[in-house]
Image: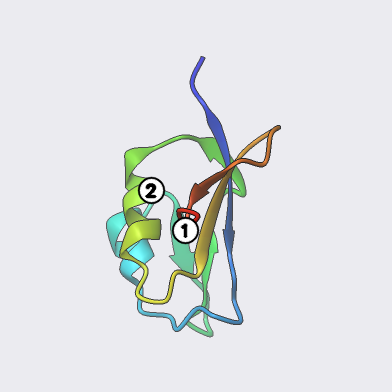
Amino acid sequence: MGDRWHVEVDRSVCIGSGMCAGLAPDGFALDSARQSHPRRAETDAAEQILEAAEGCPVEAITITLLGSGEVVFPPEE
């Protein structure tokens, strides 16, 4: 069984670029205020979701492992 992720978008940081929705349309959507939100807060680990988080120009997307809370993205420095 693969990893499960918790995906969050910090709407106070999101600038509505739409990069996430473009890279992972099954994972993210923009609302009428052009703010991103995950389509599902809990999801199977997926390369598209990670690519969308990495592509966010303001790093508004956080991905953690369900259960442990270990950070998948953004990487800890």
Q: Position of 7 compared to 29: left or right?
A: right
According to the picture, the residue beneath numbered tag 1 turns out to be 77
Marks 1/2: CA distance? 17 Å
Q: Position of 52 compared to 38: left or right?
A: left
At horizontal 59% and vertical 71% (from top left) the residue drawn is 10
Q: Position of 28 compared to 19: left or right?
A: right
Dot 1 or dot 2: first in sequence order is: 2
Q: On screen, 7 above or below 67?
A: below
Residue 45, image x and y in percent? 46, 35
Tell me the quarter of the picture where residue 21 sits.
Answer: bottom left
Judging depth in this view, the residue of 58 and 15 nearest the camera is 58
User: Residue 50 — which label?
Assistant: 2
Q: Residues within 10 Å of mark 2 (few under 14, many from 20)?
A: many
User: Residue 11 — which label?
Assistant: none
Furthest-top residue in view? 1
Q: Position of 45 compared to 57: left or right?
A: right
Judging depth in this view, the residue of 40 and 76 nearest the camera is 76
At horizontal 34% and vertical 59% (from top left) the residue drawn is 54
Report whether residue 39 is seen. no
Tell me the quarter of the picture where residue 53 sits.
Answer: bottom left
Residue 16, image x and y in percent? 43, 80
Amino acid identity at mark 1: Glu
Amino acid identity at mark 2: Leu
Q: What SS does tag 1 mark? A: loop
Residue 51, image x and y in percent? 31, 52
At horizontal 54% and vertical 57% (from top left) the residue drawn is 62
- Quick check: marks 1 and 2 in contact, CB under 8 Å? no
| Between marks 1 and 2 in the image, the one whose residue lies nearer the viewer | 1
